[in-house]
Image (tube, helix red, strand yellow):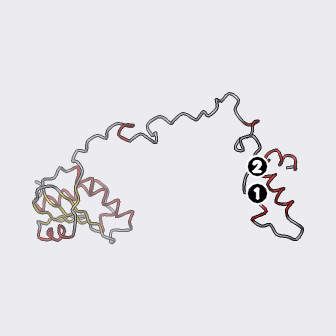
């Protein structure tokens, strides 16, 4: 690219550099005071040169706002519609160490992949325990998601329920885990 082309493409930058180079004497290094701090008034918009502007576009026109299901300002419920109600509703979690300690005295049941303990209560609350013996975080989270979905689908009675996954739960698919949870809940007497 020749010097002439550089002058056309970057007029403001080229002028600033020429000033800085002209102020430098041979053997002298460039300093902050050698660079202009204020841009020169050229009479045109430095962001877009006249030859590159769209002549048909009105002054100050902006792109139209995005529309559709994923508009940034729209909430998900308005854009896509309300989420259908879940069959079992949202599960409430057991909170605090005391709730888990009380469940030690609860009625127990055991399956191949899970152990359950429960006590009667005013509302259904669930605690899901998946230890590091089951696997790394991704595997543990997968087992927890599956157990939570199984419990949500079962329409359980009012109780505080603790579900502890065994290390073998990582190999179980959803259907096997489902059957095992139901088996353990039947053994414990929570469901018939």
Image position of 43 (left or right of 192): right
Image position of 171 (left or right of 101): right
Image position of 123 (left or right of 31): left
Q: Position of residue 129 (x, y in %)?
A: 26, 66
In-front residue for pair 109/2: 2
Occupied quadrant, residue 94:
bottom left
Where disc 2 sits, the SS reads loop
In-front residue for pair 65/126: 65
Above/below status of 64 relative to 107: above
* Count of picture labels: 2
Where disc 1 sits, the SS reads loop
Query: What whole-number distance in Å separates the C-alpha atoms at marks 1 and 2?
Result: 9 Å
Mark 1 Cα within 10 Å, few/some/many (few <14, many 20+)?
few
Query: Which disc number belongs to residue 40?
Result: 2
Above/below status of 56 relative to 17: above
Occupied quadrant, residue 169:
bottom left
Q: Residue at x 43, y 37 (%)?
A: 69
**Label 1 sits on residue:** 36
Q: Position of residue 67 (x, y in %)?
A: 48, 34
In-front residue for pair 56/127: 56
Above/below status of 28 relative to 48: below
Query: Which disc number belongs to residue 109?
Result: none
């Amino acid at each position: 690219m020749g010097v002439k082309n550089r002058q056309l493409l970057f007029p403001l930058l080229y002028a600033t550099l020429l000033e800085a180079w002209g102020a430098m004497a041979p053997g002298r290094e460039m300093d902050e005071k050698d660079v202009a701090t204020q841009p020169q008034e050229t009479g045109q918009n430095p962001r877009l040169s006249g030859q590159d502007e769209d002549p048909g576009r009105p002054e100050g026109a902006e792109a139209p706002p995005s529309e559709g299901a994923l508009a940034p300002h729209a909430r998900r419920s308005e854009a896509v519609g309300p989420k259908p109600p879940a069959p079992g509703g949202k599960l409430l979690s057991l909170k605090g160490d005391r709730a888990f300690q009380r469940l030690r005295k609860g009625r127990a049941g055991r399956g191949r992949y899970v152990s359950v303990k429960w006590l009667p209560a005013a509302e259904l609350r669930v605690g899901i325990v998946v230890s590091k013996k089951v696997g790394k975080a991704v595997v543990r989270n997968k087992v927890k998601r599956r157990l939570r979905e199984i419990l949500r689908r079962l329409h359980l009675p009012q109780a505080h329920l603790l579900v502890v996954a065994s290390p073998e739960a990582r190999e179980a698919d959803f259907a096997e885990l489902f059957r095992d949870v139901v088996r353990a809940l039947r053994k414990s007497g929570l469901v018939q």
